[in-house]
Image: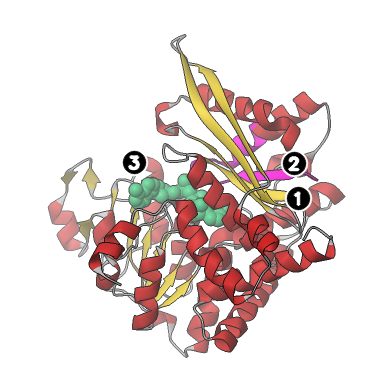
Amino acid sequence: MGVLSLSRRQFQSPYERFCTVLEHVMERLKLSTRERAMLREPQHEHAAELSLQRDDGSATVFPAYRIQFNNARGPYKGGIRYHSAADADEVKALAALMAIKTAVVDIPFGGSKGGVQCDPKTLSRKELQELSRAYVRAFAPHLGADIDCPAPDVNTTPEIMAWMRDEYEKVTRTYDPAMITGKPLSYGGSRGRDTATARGGFFILQELVDRDALDPKELRVAIQGFGNAGAAMAIFLHQAGYTVVAVSDSQGGIYCPEGLDPIRIQKYKKKTGSVTGEYCKGSVCDIEKMKLDHVRRVTNAELLELPCDVLIPAALDNVVTAENAERVQARYILELANGPVSPEADALFEERGVTVVPDVLANAGGVTVSYFEWSQGRSGEQWTDEQVDRELKRIMLDAYKAVRRTARREKISYREAAFLVGVQRIVTTMRARGWV
Ligand code: NAD
């Protein structure tokens, strides 16, 4: 591929990047024109403008979306993201990924996603609650346990899920604990949901490491993003003996070749708001303390290129592209974030023999435990931690094995194999239902 075409293609939108992989897979499966058309476009795209009365009495309008991609296999399922980049295209791409993901782990859901284009850091707690309730009022007719079941994503939390359930039950005058997942334990949540995304990714990484007869103690891991997914992953890996050499958040990161203690970092992040909080206040760092601990500050771009064996992007999308892929040193990349590696970077990694575990497999633990929460909400049962962990492991490893078998048989990457498994399952159901 020439330099010109590479640089032009870097500007693909998230949805275009999704389509790049989808088109390959649909061609390989020789799908009909109608099947391809149904898999390319969402079934419903809902949009609204949420008007929020601010604490100072002024009003701000925020664009909001709920995009329902495909429900052949069950109710739509997908998180709600609060972020300034959460526009219609990004939400559509994330909804499409959800449809593939639920099929890869073979749970009875379709795919959807929601978003509010806002910077939640500029909102007070009261404003955040009002915005979350406004989202539910705007989309209530399209939500429900049997219709479309939201969950947390970037910048949305169990507390926000609780406000949303409460608003939904008020508006619809129903009792519907399964209409949303990722709720607090005290209000219909499931054990293990808070760490599920990381736990699922951890099971897959362990399987890869075992397969390649590697010793976790000799593996260095760099993790971008220290939120729900990234922080829990750092802790699981540390506890299993891996050396977590770098972590970061939106304000940058820290690197220590000898290994960091993620539990300590989490404590400082809670206290200071940043993973660098133990060493730095804003841009002023305690250089002596950093020297003593063999720690240095790194940018988010530098983190991706550090010497390590496993790279785990766990923040935002499109961070590893044709521009920096050559400088990535890891042998394994586990996509805990959605869409962090671009199709061009994928191609370069394949040439170099770097294993990329794609988002639709690597981070599917979150939606899998959401499925457990949805089932518990419907039946009134309460699962134990052991039950959640055992079932999550079984589902993640079954999915991993299906993807690995397909990758070997077809001689394709894990990403294409995961899409192939997912698309095949969706199409089989669409055919059975007489849709195509
Ligand atoms: P979160 O909001 O809890 O955490 C996001 C983290 O990324 C924070 O540490 C934040 O500081 C950091 N960050 C923000 N901007 C950054 C930047 N420019 N550079 C580096 N770091 C930055 O979100 P989360 O729930 O952990 O989600 C992270 C990713 O994982 C997203 O792509 C999300 O779609 C994906 N994911 C999450 C879940 C889940 O259950 N939480 C499930 C599947 C996929």
**Which residue occupies the extreme front position in the image?**
33
- Residue depicted at 27% across the width and 65% down the height: 324
Which one is earlier in the sequence, the residue at label 2 or at label 3?
2
Quadrant for the N terminus in the image: bottom left
User: Is 389 covered by the magenta stretch?
Assistant: no
Q: CA distance from mark 1 to mark 2?
A: 10 Å
Please state the total of marks drawn on the protein image. Answer: 3
Foreground label between 1 and 2: 1
* Disc sitting over residue 75 in the figure: 1
Q: CA distance from mark 3 to mark 1?
A: 40 Å
User: Is 147 covered by the magenta stretch?
Assistant: yes
Q: Which is more toward the observer, 161 or 105?
A: 105
Instruction: Specify the quadrant of the image occupied by residue 191.
Output: bottom right
Across and down, in percent, residue 269 comes to 37, 46
Across and down, in percent, residue 222 comes to 35, 66
- Residue depicted at 34% across the width and 53% down the height: 11
Across and down, in percent, residue 315 comes to 42, 53
- In the image, taking residue 370 as reference, residue 129 lies left or right, namely left
- In the image, taking residue 406 as reference, residue 294 lies left or right, namely left
Q: Which residue is mark 3?
A: 272
Q: Residues within 10 Å of mark 3 (few under 14, many from 20)?
A: some
